[in-house]
Image (spheres, rainbow, N blue to C red):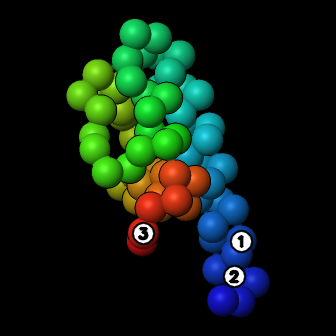
Amino acid sequence: MDSSDIIKQYKQKTIFNNLIVTFTAKNPDGQCGDLKTNCCTDPTKCIRNFSSYDVKLNFDKGQKLIAGCAQ
């Protein structure tokens, strides 16, 4: 793993954390907070909207890094 991979992981984690705050604020009764600890199931009560497919991919990879799931 070189420095560009480490920077990419930091970016993915940051995107995930920032979007979790946004999603939780928009869905106060939802299950968006569960995404930090569980990436095996998709919470049905968390509405997620992404500005682009690239942001969605970074969000998913950041979730796997933070929740500790296998990539």
Residue 33, placed above or below residue 9? above
Residue 20, placed above or below residue 1? above
- Pointer 3 residue: 70
Circle 1 residues within 10 Å: few <14, some 14–19, many ≥20: few
- Residue furthest to the left in view is 44
Label 3–label 2 contact, CB within 8 A: no
SS type, badge 3: loop
SS type, badge 2: helix
User: Mark 3 to mark 2: distance in Å?
Assistant: 20 Å
The three-letter code of the residue at mark 3 reads: Ala
Viewed as shown, does residue 13 lie left or right of 29? right
The three-letter code of the residue at mark 2 reads: Ser
Viewed as shown, does residue 26 lie left or right of 18? left
Q: x, y (%) of residue 8?
A: 63, 70
- Residue furthest to the top in view is 29
The three-letter code of the residue at mark 1 reads: Ile
Which image quadrant is residue 60 in?
bottom left
Circle 2 residues within 10 Å: few <14, some 14–19, many ≥20: few
Label 2–label 1 contact, CB within 8 A: yes
Q: x, y (%) of residue 44?
A: 24, 28
Q: x, y (%) of residue 5?
A: 64, 80
Instruction: Give the residue drawn at x 42%, y 44%.
Output: 38
- Pointer 2 residue: 4
User: Mark 1 to mark 3: distance in Å?
Assistant: 19 Å
Q: Quadrant of the C terminus?
A: bottom left
Instruction: Give the residue drawn at x 49%, y 29%.
Output: 33
Q: x, y (%) of residue 15?
A: 59, 48
- Pointer 1 residue: 7
Viewer-proximal residue, 34 or 27?
A: 34
- Residue furthest to the right in view is 3
In front: label 3 or label 2: 3
